[in-house]
Image (cartoon, rainbow, N blue to C red):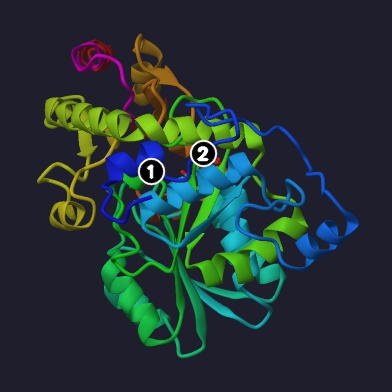
Amino acid sequence: MSKDWQKGTRAVHAGTRRSQYGEVSEAIFMTQGFVYDTAEQAETRFEACGDDEFIYARYGNPTVKMFEDRIAALEGTEDAFATASGMAAVNGALMSLLKAGDHVVSSRALFGSCLYIAEEILPRFGVEVTFVDGSDLAQWEAAIRPDTSAVFFESLSNPALELVDIEAVCALAHAKGAVAVCDNVFATPVYSNAVAQGADIVIYSTTKHIDGQGRALGGVILGTREMIRNTVEPYMKHTGGSMSPFTAWIMLKGLETMRLRVREQSATALRLARALEGHENLSRVIYPGLPSHPQHDLALRQMGDGGTMLAIEVAGGKEAAYRFLNACKVAIISNNLGDAKTILTPPAFTTHQRLPQDQKDALGITPGLVRISVGLEDAGDLEEDFMQALSH
Ligand SMILES: *Cc1c(COP(=O)(O)O)cnc(C)c1O
């Protein structure tokens, strides 16, 4: 790969490894293991595995390696480790990095399973976690201590779409020698500058925009070669959370079209947000690309775009929200995001059902809130669908 290649070219060509047949589309190496020519070669490979050498698919596989190299080239990191799901990536990054006695500062607004790891699992292994309001820099500054090992946050939170100022939080973390771990799913690799902004580890659930078509679970941990190969890989390859070759192939093909999809989805999201804002049956429209979003300037500075996700609060609470959800004919009710299909989720009663009311209140997860993952349908059809559903 040429260093001068732009993101669009990297997304299509970076990481490609062709077999002796010279295939155009990346091959799926559906194999758990690899044959050695001699016993001596087996011994050497276990001693030190070269760049294009493989031992066992839990450690690495040519198709998975192609995906890791391509997403690392896109994100601008030296290396990547692909995982079986987004949660395997979050768990793997944190567990490989931390040990008993460590202190972590985390934003409170997290994806349900990320919150479970930070709130339930890490403390069980002796890691102390302090939660802060991710959009409040003063809280980060007060919580990060000289002995803090890591900070963890979602750069754009689910479902209330609050931003964490990556540059500022990473600077605070680095000043105390802490590693900054950024779950960047909602920002997508298309609008990510997380590494330039200071993140040491960037995580994606590739289930979302990278696949983008609702087919497979996957995840990836991105960072320096030292971090990925010496800290993350030993944990992942021995605990079994590696990505399958077939999934890696789906994700490779997903990366080729991701920019087109995400840009189209974002353009539609902006159009819908503008059309919905001020509607008499909505009490709020939350979209980082709207000037009414309290962090609109930060969103443009950090991502250069408002992204593919928006949230609306239907006036009249749960009953009114359910009437809206049940009346939509194009958008579907589910819980994935970044998909080609527009997906509606009522977070208070699904993804965040488990949270006690006071936590839901703190995160802005009201009964009338509906999260919208904007898909690839015709924008006019979606607008019409939402308008007719809101009239119910
Ligand atoms: C979906 C998601 C995850 C988990 O990814 P899976 O692929 O479902 O395991 C983690 N973080 C965020 C922000 C997500 O949206």
Which three-letter amino acid code belongs to the residue tagged 2? Thr
Are dots 2 and 1 in contact, CB under 8 Å? yes
Identify residue for label 1. 159
**Amino acid type, mark 1:** Pro
Query: Residue 234 falls in which quadrant of the image?
Result: bottom right
| Visible residue check, residue 315 | no
Label 1 Cα crowd, 10 Å radius (few <14 / some 14-19 / many 20+): many
Residue furthest to the bottom in view is: 146
In the displayed structure, 52 sits above or below 332; it is: below
Question: Which residue in the structure is indicated by mark 2?
Answer: 351
Residue 182 falls within the magenta-colored stretch:
no
Which of 243/274 is in front?
A: 243
Measuring from the top left, give residue 256's x and y in whole percent.
39, 32
- Judged from the image, the secondary structure of the residue bearing numbered disc 1 is loop
Ligand 1 has an atom within 8 Å of the beta carbon of the residue at disc 2: no
Residue 375 picture location, percent across and down: 33, 24
Magenta stretch contains residue 374 = yes
Is 88 left, or right, of 40 in this rendering? left
What is the spatial separation of the Cα atoms under label 2 and label 1, in whole angstroms?
A: 9 Å
Find the residue positioned furthest to the right.
39
**Residue 376, above or below 337:** above
Q: Is residue 62 above or below residue 358?
A: above
The residue that appears at 72% across and 57% down in the rendered structure is: 237
The magenta stretch is: 373-383
Category of crowding for the residue at label 2, using alpha-carbon neighbours closer than 10 angstroms: few (below 14), some (14–19), many (at least 20): some
Front residue (pair 226, 112) = 226
Residue name at image x 28 percent, y 40 percent: 8
Percent x, y of residue 311: 30, 36
